[in-house]
Image: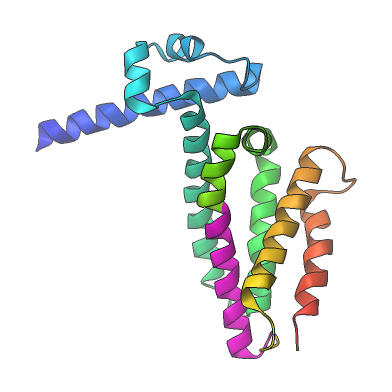
Amino acid sequence: MRTENRRQRKKDQTKENIYKAALELFLEKGYDKTTIEEITEKADVAKGTFFNHFPSKNAILFYLGEKRLVLLDKVLGEKLIEIQSAKEKLFEYFRILARFNEEEKEITHLIVIEIFKNADLRKLSDEKSIVDFQVVLGKIINEGKQRGEFSSDVNTTHAADILAGLYFHTLFSWLQGKLSESLTSELFGRIEIIINGIEP
């Protein structure tokens, strides 16, 4: 058992080393200009080892996105459990998202822009990340409807779709430098209009 655990730890460490080497190169040279050969050289692994962990360069970017989502979910879970009001939960949810992206703007830019450009990555993202995002928003909206904070006539799916779409549109505009204020300020100004609109 100990030998198996040691092997798994070594395998996990190798994967992490490849990922870190790739991320450094992506941020330094750009995703498109970074080759698998450069990644394996920087990580000091054979090409076959690379493909044992990642079937493609795209897989590294998706892995990066998933790692961030796991961390974000942990932070959100710890913060939101302390809040009773559904309205405040929504505001806190978007506040955490905005700050998370502001603190790691370069990485956010890398993920979002490449997903937008790459059809395969976009398909993977659409299938999981965005759907999960809308599910969380839907749960909070339903809580608000049950507590009387939001109108019972509100279509939960439509409201969650609108909030998610507004978030991604604002995030993308901010990353492109089209907005004059911080992501938090720009996002809150927009989200508040929607949340106020679904109150009874």
Picture quarter with the C terminus: bottom right
Instruction: Say which residue appears at 87% left-offset and 42% top-offset.
Output: 178
From the viewer's perspective, is residue 96 above or below residue 2?
Answer: below
From the viewer's perspective, is residue 66 above or below residue 133?
Answer: above
Q: Residue furthest right?
A: 180
**Where does the magenta region start and end?**
130-150
Instruction: Say which residue appears at 69% left-offset and 82% top-offset.
Output: 154
Residue 1 location, quadrant:
top left
Taking 159 as reference, is 53 left or right? left
Q: Nearer the viewer, residue 123 or 69?
A: 123
Q: Position of residue 176 (x, y in %)?
A: 81, 37
Q: Nearer the viewer, residue 186 or 127?
A: 127
Instruction: Say which residue appears at 55% left-offset and 37% top-offset.
Output: 121
Q: Main secondary structure of the magenta part?
A: helix
Q: Position of residue 110 (x, y in %)?
A: 65, 32
Asked whether residue 147 is drawn in magenta, I would say yes
